[in-house]
Image (cartoon, coloured by chain):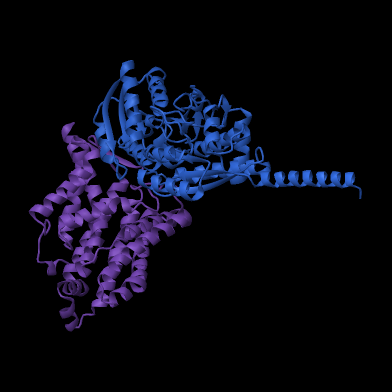
Chain colours: A purple, B blue
Amino acid sequence: MTTTIVLQQAINGVVLGSLYVLVALGLTLIYGVLVQINFAHADFVTLGAFAAYFLMHLVGAGYIVSIGFAFVVGAVLGWLINASIFTPLRRKGNELLPLIATIGVSVMMQNLMLAWFGPIPYAFETKYSSEVIRFAGIFVSWQNVIIIAVSSVTIALLYAFMKFTFLGKALRAVSQDRETAGLMGINPNQLIMLTFIIASALAGMAGAMLAPVLVLTPFAGTSVIVKAFAIVIIGGFGNVEGTILAGLIVGLVESYTTQYLDPGLIDIVVFGLLLLMLAIKPTGLISERREENV
Amino acid sequence: MNTGFRALFVGVAAISLLTIGHAAHAQDKTIKIGALFPMSGPGSYFGAQDKQGVELALEQLNKNGVNGYKFAVQYEDSSCGPLPATQAAKRLIEQFKPDVIIGEECSDATLAVMPIVDQAKVPLLNAGSSSIKVTEPGNPWTFRIMPNEVMQGINLADNAYKRLNARNAVLLFENTNAGIGNAQVFKDTFTKLGGKVLAEIGFGRDVNDFTSIATRVAGLGKIDVIPTYTLEGQGLKITQALAQAGVTKGGGGDAIQIGTIWLPFGFEQKAGKAALGYIRIVQFDPTETRDAVKNFSTAFKAKYNADPTHLNAHAYDQIMLIADVVKRGGKDAQSIRDGLAATKNYSGVTGSVEFDKTNQNTKMDTVHYMETKPDMSWTSLKWN
């Protein structure tokens, strides 16, 4: 029984960690390239969740299609907001302005969603939520299988994009030294736009994956974003590999804290880990030179 | 015109003017009601449904007024939390200057507001907070029409032990005054009766994934009942996770989830088959045959094209009870407070109201039980 529980909690932790990773990757990408925290990231997650919900319930689309739709909605919104708000502010040369603007965008998006969707929690059910695979005392819902599969593929594709494609290499060049990258013929503004689009698309997709897990309200994303920030710090600011590792660790820590300590202690343990990391290894789990993070 | 006729004319004119003036003044008289409801955050479903009940009551009362008074409500978002609730209460008292305040729903928020209304000497009529601290040891300005956590908890534990033959329980609750208090009362009563509490699992409101908690519960052996104290959103996820883990009836297990007045009607439709067999206390039973209930249900459906929930009902009752006090002479904060305290056997749509010396409603007919059926509808258990 004990082994079964340990294994079951490991699966639970990996599922939760995968979701955290998807949310945190967008944050870490933006930080890696712009050295900027995007406080509106949580609301892209929420909007992705609602986009998937309404595609399924109004159009009758399948869940997998709705995940792709949330990805596209996130990307379009990321492009729109970056082009209309953040880029003009960045041109003014004051780094504080776009940072504050992310807070403004967050409040605006939350209240718009509150006005559109109302405050009452939505039940985001998919046919995969209630279908459970049971073997040797272990249970996994098909929903969780999809979460692990889609997260793994997304993370692998993102990793390959960053390491092996021209655009990925260009992103890394911009994060190393924006001015020098510009002198090499790379347009930093286009790369910043690309970063926003990828990060927002990931957030939208994470929303669609989280929606059956989360309590879906206009404030849904805010409940995971604090953990995502912690994961970015534990993993190492702007470090993709570190973020993936930290996300999985936090997911597992939550599961085992629930099992062997108390779920009421989850935040104490996770943020204790964060403080410990800041004290012992402030550069995060996988430390690289800051310029090479992305 | 002789002097006598002139005097008569002036006298009649003066009386007429006085009467007209008085009538006009009476029409202008308004009882100002401040409403502290959670309109944002995880408890915002309370506020949305409370507002519907309040608006229906206002529509009915303001057609003719009560004792020459009309009723006006100012809503403030108190967000189910102590800090926003205190800010909202201060705004209400300073700017709107209410004669009476209704709300909040969440105990932590109500407890935070109580010293403020006490200082301002404005009565607070509560219908949704269950923490015993709201009325113990008692506050002259705070009244509660809802059965408190002790009344509900003792009744629930008693019914679990005697009617459901439950002997083993696992307690799931949010780490708030109400969550901890409700769980504690159940535990005390259930263990006194001879039952055993296998685990007490508390969690914060930021927990989203309950699979790990369900896994832990599944590893605890034979469980008969799982008293659960959370808001709707987390409640949905807990119910689904427990079913996935095969613990509850909805997932093929034996355990029955039970609970007190936390969840709105419609919960079972959202939770799906995972909610099968869920037994919980609600504050309003629309299947009651009393005229008050039938009339309310009809009027609500006509206005909103939906069936009323217990949140709609208890908000409606709050306003109607204030109107009853005004009918009995209430006209300002002090007289409304005194009128509330003197309430005897008031019959509302949720049940009867009569306050004890701590201003707690003593009537247990506001406690109704419902059970989720296989088709996700529910049935009234008529246990009280």
Q: Residue B244: horizontal and vertical position, in percent? A: 32, 38
Does any portion of residue A60 appear in the rendered image? no
| Residue B155 placement, left or right of A150 | right
Does any portion of residue B291 appear in the rendered image? yes
Q: Is B124 located above or below residue A89 in the figure?
A: above
Q: Nearer the viewer, residue B122 or B277?
A: B122
Quadrant of the image containing the N terminus of chain A: top left
Quadrant of the image containing the C terminus of chain A: bottom left
Q: Residue B22: horizontal and vertical position, in percent? A: 70, 44
Task: Looking at this view, name the residue that lies furthest to the front.
Answer: B3
Task: Looking at this view, name the residue that lies furthest to the left.
Answer: A280
Question: In which image quadrant can residue A195 be found?
Answer: bottom left
| Residue A245 placement, left or right of B4 | left
Q: Nearer the viewer, residue A98 or A184?
A: A98
Which residue is found at the position 17% from the left and 49% from the top? Answer: A249
Question: In which image quadrant can residue A83 be found?
Answer: bottom left
Q: Residue B132: horizontal and vertical position, in percent? A: 38, 29
Q: Residue B15: horizontal and vertical position, in percent? A: 78, 43
